[in-house]
């Protein structure tokens, strides 16, 4: 399993984009809306690891609720899965609280699911795999 990306929730996307553009000396290589999650994602390449800035697009989105509760910062770590359905089933059977009814469409052409942070030492953990 490899780290696929790091998700960071932000309140002020314009300020955050400027900060990360200076930090990485690069523009985001991709911006994408995921309407079902109420989020707009902005991806940077940080030397082979993707950094995903998460901008809420509606007040009831998971990212908006995260920002209200915890403020801006680390939102999740995402790991690349070789078999997303098998990983979902394996973790569910092991007693982890997997969120949702199974993998679903996410950003960057991926199928995704999340494991509740209370089962992973307080860090929301995502598994993702390129959609087939």
Image (spheres, rainbow, N blue to C red):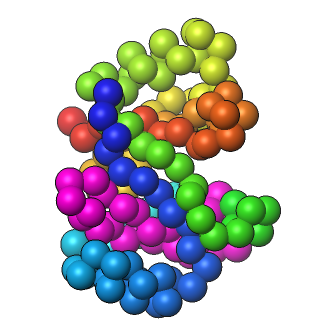
Judge whether 15 appears above or below 4 on screen. Answer: below
**How many tags in the picture?**
0
The residue located at (36%, 51%) in the rendering is 5
Q: Nearer the viewer, residue 121 or 4?
A: 121
Q: State which region is magenta.
A: 38-64
Q: Is residue 15 left or right of residue 105?
A: right
Judge whether 91 appears above or below 5 on screen. Answer: above
Q: Is residue 112 visible?
A: no
Q: Is residue 33 left or right of residue 117?
A: left
Q: Nearer the viewer, residue 93 or 132?
A: 93
Q: Is residue 94 left or right of residue 7?
A: right
**Residue 47, magenta (yes or no):** yes
Outermost front residue: 23
Residue 70: name its quadrant.
bottom right
Q: Split into 4 quadrants, where in the image is the N terminus? A: top left
- Residue 39 in picture, x, y percent from top left: 51, 67
Residue 120: name its quadrant.
top right
Q: Nearer the viewer, residue 83 or 53?
A: 53
- Residue 81 in picture, x, y percent from top left: 32, 29
The residue located at (36%, 61%) in the rendering is 51
Q: Is residue 53 visible?
A: yes
Outermost top residue: 93
- Residue 29 in picture, x, y percent from top left: 22, 72
């Amino acid at each position: 399993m490899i780290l696929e990306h790091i998700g960071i929730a932000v309140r002020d996307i314009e300020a955050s984009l400027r900060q990360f553009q200076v930090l990485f000396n690069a523009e985001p290589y991709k911006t994408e809306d995921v309407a079902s999650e109420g989020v707009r994602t902005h991806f940077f390449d940080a030397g082979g690891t993707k950094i995903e800035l998460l901008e809420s697009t509606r007040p009831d989105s998971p990212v908006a609720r995260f920002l209200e509760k915890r403020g801006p910062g680390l939102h999740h770590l995402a790991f690349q899965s070789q078999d997303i359905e098998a990983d979902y089933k394996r973790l569910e059977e092991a007693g982890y609280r997997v969120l949702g009814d199974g993998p679903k469409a996410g950003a960057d052409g991926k199928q995704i699911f999340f494991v509740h942070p209370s089962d992973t030492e307080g860090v929301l953990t995502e598994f993702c795999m390129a959609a087939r």
